[in-house]
Amino acid sequence: MLEIMLAVRPRWLQLILSGIKDVELRKSRPRTAELFLVDLYETKSYGGRGAVVGRCLCYCVARVKDLSEMAALQENSCVSTADMLQYSGQRHLCAWYLADIEQFSAQRLLSEYGISRAPQSWCYVKEGAK
């Protein structure tokens, strides 16, 4: 199964781990149409740990192109339509639908995944890492 490392700021990560936020918005997506594993990396910004703290499955990535589609995602993404438009630069977004969200009992280092520096948004995890 394809595995992705997703960098998330602490505020948003807590919403994901609590189950409130189950749609993550990004400007790009992995090149797959299949279910994939997402490792959740909490960024160091805003007092974050700089470690992998959980994982989940992404069962669908949908391209969001217009205002009505963005409005429909507000509740599950915890992001306003205005913020989506600003982030997207008036272009499309990719809505990552997350499920089976799990928080680790102990944080993990990126090096355990064969990753030497924090991803800017997301990156592929090499097969056989960990």
Image (cartoon, rainbow, N blue to C red):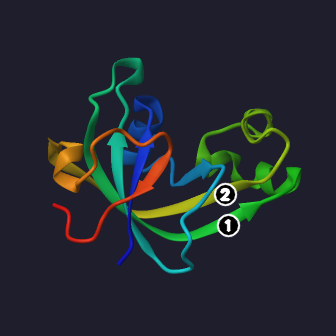
Residue 101, percent from left and from top = 35, 58
Callout 2–callout 1 Cβ contact below 8 Å: yes
Quadrant position of the N terminus in the picture: bottom left
For the point 43% across and 65% down, which residue is it? 99
Quadrant position of the C terminus in the picture: bottom left
User: Residue under circle 2?
Assistant: 94
Label located before the other in sequence (2 or 1): 1
How much space separates mark 2 and mark 1, taking CA atoms? 6 Å
**Horizontal placement of 73 versus 70: left or right?**
left
In this rendering, is residue 48 above or below 117? above
Q: Residue 62: which disc?
A: 1
Front in this rendered view, residue 71 or 96:
96
Q: Residue 97: which disc?
A: none
Dot 1 alpha-carbon crowd within 10 angstroms: few under 14, some 14 to 19, many 20 or more: few
**Horizontal placement of 104 versus 120: left or right?**
left
Dot 2 alpha-carbon crowd within 10 angstroms: few under 14, some 14 to 19, many 20 or more: some
* Three-letter amino acid code at the position of disc 2: Cys
Residue 73, percent from left and from top = 70, 52
Residue at the far left in the pictured view: 106
Residue 48 lies in quadrant: top left
Element carrying mark 2: strand
Residue at the far front in the pictured view: 116
> From where the camera sits, is residue 101 visible?
no
Residue 53, percent from left and from top = 25, 44
For the point 76% across and 55% down, which residue is it? 72
> From where the camera sits, is residue 41 visible?
yes
